[in-house]
Image: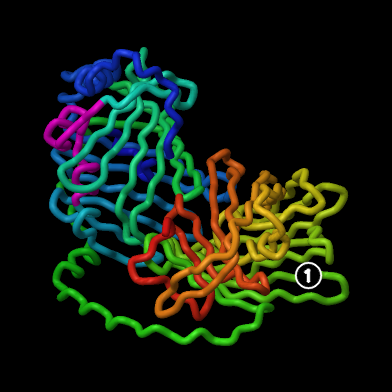
């Protein structure tokens, strides 16, 4: 119910007994309101302003956050990131919008608009019966060390939201949800901590947001209620107003299936999709010479309001696939980032610069670790495809070093040879499945399909709705990462 769930969202395993008596959802939600100040205290507020800091975990990227809210459902969120600029989103109660220095303005439509207006309701905890068609207590789980009741809120339109409330204190501990965005449906969670009194209301001051294997933390520095806000605070920005006057763009003509080109196993081009929408492209080469293997390439991505340019990502190993050195260079908006890593004696020594000064970090790694990035680019996973055994279906353990972060263990299983459907064609490929966890402890699974030369033809990360296709192999119409 909190308006600070900028990236809502991941699911814990149930640990409750089927015999446990569960309170109904209304009882749990009333307990939450009473535990944080009571109905009268909530009703006494007609607007609120929150100031805070935002920190993208492990990225060296930090900024400021300001949130304005007012009855009945007006809001404005302003994020400022040095080197990237201002990212704004909000609603005047009718129009939901976004605007950023990277991608300009856009107006939310359909379910995305419906979700934004509902999520933007001021004091939503008092009006859940109007906002949702159904609320159910579906179980009890241990979440972030708290014994919690699990409440599922289902709206008339849009996706359900799941909330976890501490059994004893009544406080909201976590929210999990899937939200429709311009990149498709994205799932994630926000964890609430450090509850402190602000006026008559007990409010969380630390929020950990996790989505698509990314994490950022919001630290609330001040909360003010019933502030004298300017009359135009929630007016649409001029850029957004201009969009309302533009006619709708015609739908692009459908593309025709392309013939599969004869491409070298030593080079490749990947197109990356998220929830069926193209978000990135990558080009790479695989060179073998003088007892070394060099996988290098570049790419670019547009992730919501963020533009990512990968100038170069390179991993050099010996002929036993033991990493010798790696480097990455790119930019996030106007922020330029780079890292150089050398491997020796079971250590990875990183020298990185994220625009806020050079830093050195040393990690313990296996001498045969597979070196990848935490998200994009995806082509470095080619190294894993090159090393997998097709001899049987037994699990094959591999250490995976996420460049600049830490090493995790993954299990690879060769699933066999199978036919894979693409747009206008079907191809026999080798299927590899990979399971493990991210350095942040989140479960991770991935599927790779490679040809006889070990060339990566398709990659899928079902939990993120991500798929990547080699040049000449387009996704079948209506396909998703779970197909």
For the point 61% across and 60% down, which residue is it?
A: 337
User: Which image quadrant for residue 263?
Assistant: bottom right
Residue 200 place in picture, x, y as percent: 27, 19
For the point 44% across and 22% down, which residue is it?
A: 15
Q: Nearer the viewer, residue 453 or 32?
A: 453
Judge whether 212 appears above or below 258 on screen.
above
Judge whether 387 appears above or below 199 on screen.
below
Q: Dividing the image into 4 quarters, which one contains the C terminus? A: bottom left
Is the residue marked by circle 1 packed among few (<14), some (14-19), or many (20+) residues within 10 Å? many
Residue 96 drawn in magenta: no
Image: magenta residue range: 114-136
Q: From where the camera sits, is residue 439 visible?
A: yes
Residue 122 drawn in magenta: yes
Colour option used: rainbow
Residue 24 place in picture, x, y as percent: 22, 20
Residue 121 place in picture, x, y as percent: 19, 39
Q: Secondary structure at mark 1?
A: strand
User: Which image quadrant for residue 225?
Assistant: top left
Judge whether 202 appears above or below 367 on screen.
above
Residue 114 place in picture, x, y as percent: 19, 50
Is 31 displayed left or right of 291 in the figure? Answer: left
Q: Nearer the viewer, residue 96 or 364?
A: 364
Is 80 displayed left or right of 374 in the figure? Answer: left
Residue pointed to by mark 1: 293
User: Which image quadrant for residue 254?
Assistant: bottom left
For the point 78% across and 50% down, which residue is it?
A: 348
Q: From where the camera sits, is residue 37 visible?
A: no
Q: How many marks?
A: 1
């Amino acid at each position: 119910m909190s308006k600070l769930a900028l990236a809502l969202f991941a699911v814990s395993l149930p640990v409750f007994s089927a015999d446990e008596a569960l309170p109904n959802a209304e009882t749990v939600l009333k307990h939450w309101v009473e535990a944080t100040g009571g109905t009268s205290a909530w009703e006494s507020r007609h607007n609120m302003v929150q100031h805070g800091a935002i920190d993208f975990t492990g990225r060296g990227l930090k900024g400021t956050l300001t949130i304005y809210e007012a009855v009945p459902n007006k809001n404005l969120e302003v994020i400022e990131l040095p080197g990237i600029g201002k990212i704004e989103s909000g609603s005047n109660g009718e129009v939901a919008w976004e605007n950023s220095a990277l991608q300009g303005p856009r107006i939310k439509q359909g379910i995305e608009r419906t979700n934004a207006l509902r999520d933007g309701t001021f004091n939503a905890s008092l009006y859940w019966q109007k906002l949702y068609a159904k609320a159910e207590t579906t179980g009890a789980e241990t979440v972030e060390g708290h014994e919690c009741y699990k409440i599922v809120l289902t709206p008339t339109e849009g996706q359900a939201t799941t909330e976890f409330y501490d059994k004893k204190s009544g406080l909201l501990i976590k929210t999990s949800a899937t939200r429709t965005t311009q990149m498709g449906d994205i799932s994630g969670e926000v964890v609430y901590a450090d509850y402190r009194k602000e006026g008559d209301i007990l409010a969380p001051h630390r929020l950990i947001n996790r989505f698509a294997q990314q994490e950022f933390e919001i630290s609330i520095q001040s909360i003010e209620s019933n502030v004298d806000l300017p009359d135009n605070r929630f007016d649409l920005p001029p850029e957004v107003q201009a969009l309302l006057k533009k006619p709708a763009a015609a739908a692009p003509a459908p593309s025709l299936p392309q013939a599969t080109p004869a491409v070298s196993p030593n080079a490749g081009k990947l197109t990356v999709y998220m929830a069926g929408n193209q978000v990135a492209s990558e080009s790479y080469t695989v060179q073998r010479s003088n007892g070394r293997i060099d996988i290098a390439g570049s790419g670019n991505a547009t992730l919501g309001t963020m533009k990512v340019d990968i100038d170069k990502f390179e991993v050099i190993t010996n002929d036993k696939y033991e990493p010798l050195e790696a480097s990455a260079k790119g930019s996030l908006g106007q922020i330029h980032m780079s890292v150089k890593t050398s491997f020796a004696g079971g250590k990875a020594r990183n020298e990185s610069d994220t625009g806020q000064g050079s830093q050195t970090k040393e990690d313990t790694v296996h001498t045969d670790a597979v070196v990848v990035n935490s998200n994009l680019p995806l082509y470095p996973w080619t190294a894993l495809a090159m090393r997998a055994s097709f001899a049987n279906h037994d699990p094959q353990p591999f250490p995976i070093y996420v460049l600049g972060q830490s090493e995790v263990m993954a299990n690879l299983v060769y699933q066999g040879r199978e036919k894979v459907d693409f747009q206008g064609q079907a191809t026999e490929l080798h299927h590899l499945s990979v399971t493990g966890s991210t350095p942040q402890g989140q479960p991770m699974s991935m599927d790779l399909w490679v040809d006889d030369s070990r060339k990566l033809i398709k990659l899928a990360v079902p939990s993120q709705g991500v798929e990547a296709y080699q040049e000449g192999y387009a996704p079948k119409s209506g396909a998703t990462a779970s197909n």
